[in-house]
Amino acid sequence: MLSGDSLRRSFRHAVVESSSLPPAERLIMYDACDSQEVSQSLGGSAGYRKRLDARRGNKPKKADNQRDVCTPFDHAAFNFSKISNQREILAVLPEYNILTNRFPLFPGHCLLTAKALVPQQLSATHLSAIVRLVSHSGFSAYFNSWCASASVNHFHCHLIDELPPVAQQRLVSGPRVLGEPTLRPAESSGSCYVFGASQLGLVGRAVSAMQAENQPHNLLFTPLHIYVWPKPLQRPARSFDLYPETVGGPELVGSFTVYTERDFAKLSAAAADELVRINTAPLPERLLSGGDDTRPATAPAAVEAASSSSDESDSEAGPPPKQPRTAVRACQSLDSLSLVKLLRSGSGLDELALPLALSKSCLNRSGGLEVS
């Protein structure tokens, strides 16, 4: 079984090893959360953050010629079987490798990549593998479809050692999808559908429908929930005025990274809310039924939030403070955080009464992830 501690040790070793090498030889160019990162809460109810990290601005830009979400795999193009340095492999699983991410955005940011030469399209097999890995390790994972910020058309998702800001929002009832209840983040301005981990089959049907209608999409996987953001096919022109980068998985989970002080100063909570709203769209109409009920969720997957606290004000002088990543904010899901802490501690699941959305029987059916 692949534990979170094992993956963290491998990642930390790669960071330390890389720090002593010239840039061209590094597996990881830098630690995303080191002293050179500037991170600050955007304020507002959503709890998003903005980051200033000019180093990632050196990452090569991908070509903007993506048109079809289900673009066939191209054997002539780059894929993860063509990596030149086998030391990039942090862990080996039966059907996947976990690779270093040379330009990280999050703590422990690495890639789960398929050994099979298949395109960047979620399948039932991939969904199940991601949920198992997240539930065993305590990491979160986000997925960018083709046309939704993915840069390599070979199946992969991003693993991060963090419960990101959007997953710390309280959840309320959302639209029904194929007749089943869903949740949504209470403070999110965009179209986001939150499913319990036991609704994996429903998530697969929603993804299949988006693929069939050429609708780009981003997903977030946490130990308790799966967040789905359908997107418009074309990036709104207004988005460029508000933010210089594409709005993909990192931004939708609540972290906006810019490379210049000017863009950092310009980015506000209102701009982030608008970016999320205009860069998401409803699921295909045939999946939806019922209204958008905003009452507190009563489904088994619902979690209660602690009492709200006042937003932190921005500093008026000096460099912006680094935003803590481990502090428990008042609006976050305490059940989710408790589960993540438990998984990281190596304790058994018997010590925590899990919601029905992710029961122990569900985890046991998933099977272990064995490292070869």
Image (spheres, rainbow, N blue to C red):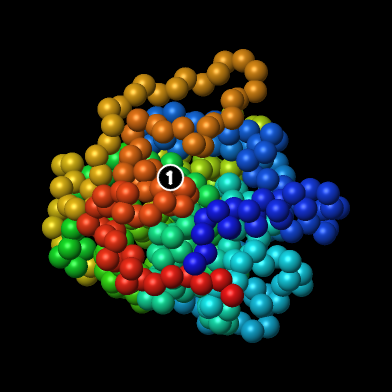
The local secondary structure at tag 1 comes to: helix
Q: Position of residue 280 (x, y in %)?
A: 38, 54
- Locate residue 183 relative to residue 259 in the image: left or right: left
Q: Position of residue 15 (x, y in %)?
A: 71, 51
Q: Nearer the viewer, residue 335 or 254?
A: 335
Q: Image point 18% across, 46% down: which residue?
A: 297
Q: Nearer the viewer, residue 75 or 67?
A: 75
Q: How many marks?
A: 1
Q: Quadrant of the C terminus?
A: bottom right
Q: Amino acid at mark 1?
A: Lys
> Taking 123 as reference, is 149 above or below it?
above
**Residue furthest right in the image:** 22
Q: Image point 33% across, 34% down: which residue?
A: 331
Instruction: Please give the residue where the numbered disc 1 appears in the rendered image.
Output: 341
Task: Place residue 221 in its image quadrant.
Answer: bottom left
Report if residue 275 is visible in the image: no
**Residue furthest top in the image:** 317
Q: Position of residue 26 (x, y in %)?
A: 78, 56
Q: Nearer the viewer, residue 36 or 20?
A: 20
Q: Image point 41% across, 66% down: which residue?
A: 132
> Taking 58 as reference, is 75 above or below it?
below
- Locate residue 256 relative to residue 336 in the image: left or right: right
